[in-house]
Amino acid sequence: MAVRTQGTPCWVDAQLPDLEAGKRFYGELFGWRFDPDRDEALLGGRRVAGLLPKRDGRMPTTWTVYLATEDAGTVAARVKASGGRMVMDPYPVGPFGVLALAADPGGAVFGLRQAGDDDGFEVTGEPGAFCWMEVYTREPEAVDTFYASVFGWLGRQADPAAEGRSSGFDYRVWSPPGSRPGDDTAFGGRAVISDDFPAEMPGHVLVYFAVRDCDETCATAVRLGGRVATDPFDTPHGRIAVLHDNQGARFAVLAEPRAQDGPAGPAAPGASAAPAEPGRATAEPAEPGRAAEPAGSAGPGHESGGTDGTRGADGTGGADEPRHPAPEL
């Protein structure tokens, strides 16, 4: 069993109202196959994510990221001591080890996973696999301190000039404890929910999956009944879009720049997302995924906004979502 760096992403899952419909959607979108005996998706025979049946219809349909820990009980105590809260205290889940659900001071929900017989991801960073996480918050200072205290995350501020953004742009890139902070070690980032976002939007986590072709993935998602929340756009780190699956779960996709493409276009990656849904939560903030951003408003560090709308199989529209840079993976 691989040794996981404490506090780093080790698993993602989504609870879906119609599990079989979800398997058809992600199976064609990412090339996933499914273990008949476990709620797990496989990419080339390797564990890549979990798809679970939603047992409480009141819960939002979203993706959750789980962070590795050797002792979920100890981390749960640190969460509470550092200004967060436990949504669900640690509980054993057979061969999957011990799971828990927590929220940071800004309300973003994430999971804890103490390894059991298996250790979560068997593949990341490849097309069809998890590649990045982002925490959105209205309380950046409290949230930065929280993750540093609980997990020892090391952060650095993204350079606005390097990202092609205004001087007030605020995005923090996170690396695991014991590493040298930088693009080579980064696994996630923190973006600010500014006043330009809907007031009801809570803190949340956005999960990214790697893909070979961002535009083709968006077209496939729409054909399968999903929706495009943020149209594909170029960044120094690749081409990014934000999607809803055929049941409303929101996630982002990233196609890294190809060597033959030359330098990528101006930085304008990322997007607002619905809050992360815990894998087995009993309480969770309302999903903000349906809340429209005011027309023409700017996202974090933005100079301008847009209203090109949400595209979907049903042809419905909505306001464009704010964008921010996703550091290089």
Image (cartoon, rainbow, N blue to C red):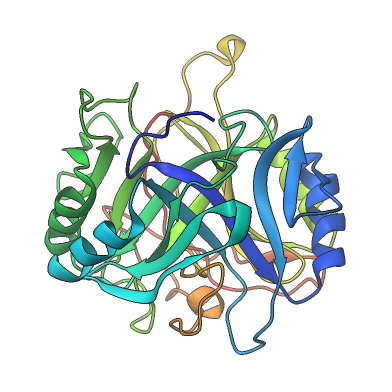
The one of 182 and 195 positioned closer to us in this rendering: 182
Q: Visible in this render: residue 229?
A: no
Q: Residue at x 87, y 65 (%)?
A: 20
Q: To which quarter of the image does residue 37 belong?
A: bottom right
Which quadrant holds the N terminus?
A: top right
Q: Residue at x 54, y 46 (%)?
A: 208
The one of 61 and 220 positioned closer to us in this rendering: 61
**x, y percentage for residue 274?**
50, 69
The one of 241 and 318 positioned closer to us in this rendering: 241
Q: Residue furthest bottom?
A: 58
Q: To which quarter of the image does residue 129 belong?
A: top right
User: Is residue 187 found left or right of 14 in the rendered image?
Assistant: left
In the displayed structure, 164 sits above or below 292; it is above
**How many numbered marks does the figure carry?**
0
User: Is residue 186 found left or right of 50 in the rendered image?
Assistant: left
Q: Residue at x 80, y 67 (%)?
A: 19
Which quadrant holds the C terminus?
A: top left
**x, y percentage for residue 295?**
45, 73
Q: Visible in this render: residue 235?
A: yes
The one of 190 and 195 positioned closer to us in this rendering: 190
**x, y percentage for residue 101?**
41, 68
Q: Residue furthest top?
A: 260
User: Is residue 187 found left or right of 13 in the rendered image?
Assistant: left
**x, y percentage for residue 202?**
36, 76
Q: Residue at x 75, y 65 (%)?
A: 312
User: Is residue 262 found left or right of 212 in the rendered image?
Assistant: left
Q: To which quarter of the image does residue 61 belong?
A: bottom right
